[in-house]
Image: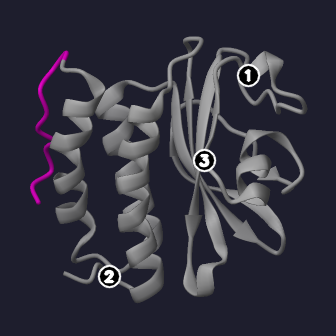
Amino acid sequence: MSESLQFTQNADRATVYAEITPQIEALISSETDIIANLANIAAVLKQAFGFFWVGFYIEKDGDLVLGPFQGPLACTRIRPDQGVCGHAYATRETVIVPDVDKFPGHIACASASKSEIVVPVFGKDGEVFGVLDVDSDRLDDFSEIDVTGLGRVVKYVEAVVEHGRLQT
């Protein structure tokens, strides 16, 4: 894949997800390094949608540790019983939070963050490898469209985690 991203400016989110998902697949299909792939995925999502913060936390020794991201400084380590990321990790389910100030135990890494979606990433043997965390500086900015779109992106990540590269 070239070093440019092609998507329709000002299109609705479903359209943009449909346009960038095959580009993400092409981008990571020949690269086996998970960190490189996560970094590029975070960059694509940030560029395409202009989210406030996009990144990955990777499970290490029972904690979620900051991985590749795009945006301002972030919390470095999150326990699995803390915040939205910890909740998604522990429940193994995608979590949408329309107003982070109303989420019990929310970790305020950046005061500009207003809403959040966190998608668990599964690895070998169905264990949680980590989470994809996306923050917005707008309230109630995420919907089922994001659950579906980010879920498709995470499936590509899971294939790389499981097999070292996408199985095509």
Question: Please, what is the three-letter code of the amino acid marked with disc 2?
Answer: Arg
Where is residue 15 drawn, in percent x and y? 19, 32
Question: Please, what is the three-letter code of the amino acid marked with disc 3?
Answer: Thr
Question: Please, what is the three-letter code of the amino acid marked with disc 1?
Answer: Val
Q: CA distance from mark 1 to mark 3?
A: 15 Å
Where is residue 48 drawn, in percent x and y? 28, 32
Q: Is residue 103 magenta?
A: no
Q: Which mark is residue 94?
A: 3
Tell me which label, 2 or 1, sits earlier in the chain.
1
Q: Residues within 10 Å of mark 2 (few under 14, many from 20)?
A: some
Q: Quadrant of the C terminus?
A: bottom left
Q: CA distance from mark 2 to mark 1?
A: 35 Å
Q: Quadrant of residue 61?
A: bottom right
- Residue range in magenta is 1-10
Taking the spot 15% from the left edge, 41% from the top edge, the residue there is 19
Q: Which residue is mark 2?
A: 165
The answer to whether residue 108 of the structure is visible from this angle is yes
CB contact under 8 Å: marks 1 and 3: no
152 left or right, relative to 76 = left
Q: Which residue is mark 1?
A: 100
Q: CA distance from mark 3 to mark 2?
A: 24 Å
